[in-house]
Image: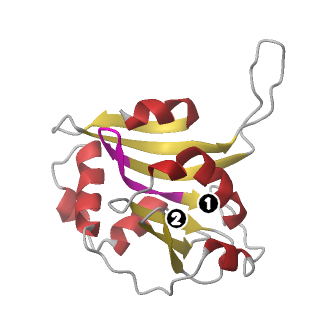
Amino acid sequence: MLLNRYEPYFFNSNFREAAPDAAWEAYRGELVLIEGEVADAQGRRKPPVALFKQAVVLAQGDELKLISGSLEELQHWPAFMEKYGADLNPATVAVMFTVNIPKPFVSTINGATVAFIPLTEGLCWNELIDLAALDKGDFKGQGAAEKVLTVFDAFKGHKYKYPETSVEEALKTTNNAKREVHGAV
């Protein structure tokens, strides 16, 4: 299964769960983009240099169906592609909430339409639900993996109203935005 291949890159996992139809499996947490350097002779590593935060992944067997989360910088896209890009296909829903881009855009990568949407504050899961035009009632009585499957189903046939731009062109327009974090004072 695809998530078995991704498991070495799981970081701060929320869950990994099979949907009632055992062919489907979902993961939420973070994925390592750039690993930390080896810290000692036993091969232990320092913390990751870059993470794909608030990741949502849905796989059906060995096929990637949904991937979404937060890229702190669009410059981390090549690292994402190195680890996970080969699994993008025309049936994949890919939504990248990216902190340092000024405007949303879509790009076709390995046949998949990948949406890049600026997001400096908020939760990717909530934004993904809004983008899919879902509300709380759509998830009533569902388990964690079933909720991810519901989001995927809502995206079938979804057309983005964003301009088509290559990632290379978009890299020329990045800004210095940082994720805004609010918490207890």
Percent position of residue 123, x then y = 49, 62
Using the numbered discs, state the Cα–Cα distance from disc 2 to disc 1 in whole angstroms: 7 Å
The answer to whether residue 134 shows anywhere in this view is yes
Question: Residue 172 got which mark?
Answer: none
* SS at mark 2 in the image: strand
Percent position of residue 70, x then y = 56, 59
Q: Is residue 176 above or below residue 91?
A: below
Confirm or deny contact between disc 2 and disc 1 (CB under 8 A). yes
Magenta residue check for 64: yes
Q: Main secondary structure of the magenta part?
A: strand
Q: Is residue 150 left or right of residue 164?
A: left
Question: Residue 96 got which mark?
Answer: 2
* SS at mark 1 in the image: strand
Residue 59, picture quadrant: top left
Residue 73, picture quadrant: bottom right
* Quadrant into which the C terminus falls: bottom right
Amino acid at pointer 2: Met
Give the mark nearer the N terminus: 2 vs 1: 1
Residue at 61%, 60% (x, y): give it: 71
Residue at 71%, 39% (x, y): give it: 48
* Quadrant into which the N terminus falls: top left
Residue at 77%, 12% (x, y): give it: 42
Instruction: Determine the residue located farthest toward the top in the rendered image.
Output: 42
The colour scheme of the drawn protein is: secondary structure
Percent position of residue 163, x then y = 50, 87
Which residue lies under the disc numbered 1? 71
Q: Is residue 84 left or right of residue 139?
A: right
Residue stretch rendered in magenta on the structure: 58-69
Magenta residue check for 87: no
